[in-house]
Amino acid sequence: MSSGPTPDGLVLADKVQRDIEQFYWLEQVAPVAAFLRIGDGDEREAVRIRDASDGAVEIEVRTPALTERPDLDTVCQYIEGVSHFVYVADRARRGLPATQLELELQAEVDKYVLLALVEPRFDANAARAVHARLYEDVRFSHPEGTEAGDRYRLANDLAARMVRRLEIFYAEKGRIAALRDALRRFYRMGQAEKIQFARAA
């Protein structure tokens, strides 16, 4: 049986939401805490979305239980769930669609943003280590050849290529403000633009 979020889970989810909204200069959406639920057992992050009969969008964000010292995988699941929530809420507010691939691709980028770019001072070595952990040393829960498995692999590959290209073009030349601006532009693109931009790497 699932339960409500723990205080630590609420704190982490709230921080992730604030960091995403502040980084991308977004209008604040509803607090994710009201939509957060702890999954059962080993259940991983999931976001359930449906259109209500009155035209509203109903969202439930399920996250794993948060331990005292969460590992990177758990933190990334919180980032992914909150990223999906903010993206869907922001797109709905602006009357724009959001596909599953868009959600996964943006979440893959948001992990990098929150783990490597939200600090005032950019550390290139730390960012490269984050890139390796997120995009190179990665395992997938869904098998290759399945719809979900292929979507996650495509999102991961596109994010890896795009982020590395932006690191080369901007970060390695000390142009961190330009790197952040490029990521903010990417956030506001639709699926076709995101894929085209990422594949230009």
Image (spheres, rainbow, N blue to C red):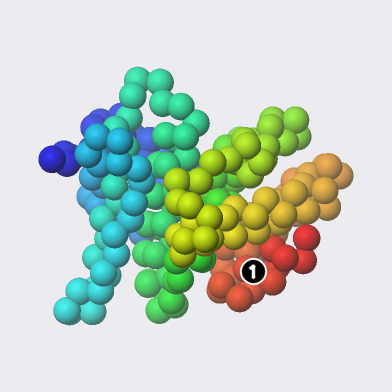
Q: Residue pushed farthest right?
A: 173
Residue positioned 72% across, 36% down in the render: 128
Closer to the camera in the image, 142 or 182: 142
Residue found farthest to the top:
68
Q: Position of residue 135 (x, y in %)?
A: 63, 44
User: From where the camera sits, is residue 81 visible?
Assistant: yes
Vertical order, 48 against 115 (above or below): below
- Determine which quarter of the picture holds residue 174: top right
The N terminus lies in which quarter of the figure? top left
Would residue 14 be found to the left or right of residue 36 on screen? right
Q: Is disc 1 surrounded by few (<14), some (14 to 19) or many (20+) residues within 10 Å?
A: many
Q: Is residue 56 left or right of residue 16?
A: left
Rendering coords of residue 153 (x, y %): 57, 55
Residue 180 image position (x, y, % from top left): 67, 52
Question: Disc 1 on helix, strand or loop?
Answer: helix
* Tally of numbered tags: 1
**Could you tell me which residue is drawn at 32 percent across and 30 percent down?**
66
* Residue 56 on image: x %, y %: 24, 73
At horizontal 59% and vertical 45% (from top left) the residue drawn is: 113
Q: Label 1: which residue?
A: 195
- Establish if 139 lies above or below 109: above
- Residue depicted at 53% across the width and 55% down the height: 144
Amino acid type shown at disc 1: Ile
Choose top left, top right, bottom left or bottom right for residue 189. Answer: bottom right
Q: Is residue 96 above or below residue 21?
A: below
Residue 155 appearing in the image = no
Quadrant (top left, top right, bottom left, bottom right) of the C terminus: bottom right
